[in-house]
Image: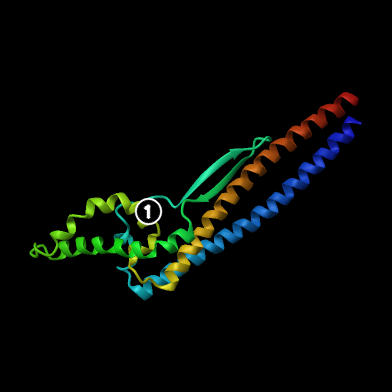
Amino acid sequence: MAELALSQELDERLLHLLGALETLQGKRDEFNSRVEQGWFSLSKSRFAMGCKSVSALQYGAHMEPLVRVCASQGEGGQVAFQVIPEWNPSTEAAEGSPSVEEIGPQDQVLRQRKGPGKTAAPGPPLGPAPKSDSQRGALSQDPLTWFGILVSQSLRQAQNSFKEGILLAGEIASLQSDIEVTQAQYRALLERKRQLLAREG
């Protein structure tokens, strides 16, 4: 009777493992496709806007993560990774006008670097800069604003592809943890069955 129960549990673990492996392969293919599409869209945007317009030189001085990863351990020991966005698309759409104002001080700082002789024009805008530092986290949540007010559609597509890739990465990590735990459980059950058969024999 114990041998039959062990055999059934082994079959369940094996079926679960095969299903998880098949799902993992599909998620990996989808992840690779999203990343490839993201890099392709990024190269298209660099061609359309210019290499200097879409490069590391435009990165914001203050960067904050747009997602956070929460890890929780299940009863069986597997770890589930959940990718949680730190921003709300509806909130970002409502704050579209302030994000345009955020571009202004950055442009004025660039003008000051290009023309250091003009001291009168760049002087006044530098006053409110400390105030904008406290609001920068809320106003410049969308990294697309680093590359200008009007960006190409391909740059937006690249951002969406990479966002979907991040979500898939969390699912892949969770599946890999589940597979490792299932393999360990299967090996333990198999060893128990061998010991039981050795005793009966």
Between 2 and 96, which is closer to the camera in this rendering?
A: 96
Q: Is residue 71 above or below residue 43?
A: above
**Left or right: 87 in relation to 138:** right
Between 187 and 68, which is closer to the camera in this rendering?
A: 68
Residue at the location (77% across, 33% down)?
A: 189
Report x, y in % for residue 145.
Answer: 35, 63
Q: Is residue 163 above or below residue 70?
A: below
Report x, y in % for residue 108.
Answer: 20, 63
Residue at the location (44% across, 68% down)?
A: 156
Between 157 and 122, which is closer to the camera in this rendering?
A: 122
**Left or right: 80 in relation to 118:** right
Q: Secondary structure at mark 1?
A: helix
How dense is the environment of label 1, judged by Cα within 10 Å: few (below 14), some, or many (20 and up)? some
Residue at the location (68% across, 35% down)?
A: 75
- The image shows a total of numbered marks equal to 1
Rendered image quadrant of residue 101: bottom left
- The residue where tag 1 is placed is 138
Report x, y in % for residue 73.
Answer: 61, 37
Between 131 and 61, which is closer to the camera in this rendering?
A: 131
In the displayed orientation, state which residue is furthest to the front: 94
In the rendered view of the protein, which quadrant contains the N terminus? top right
In the rendered view of the protein, which quadrant contains the C terminus? top right
Q: Which amino acid type corresponds to the residue marked 1 in the rendered image?
A: Ala
**Left or right: 68 in relation to 113:** right
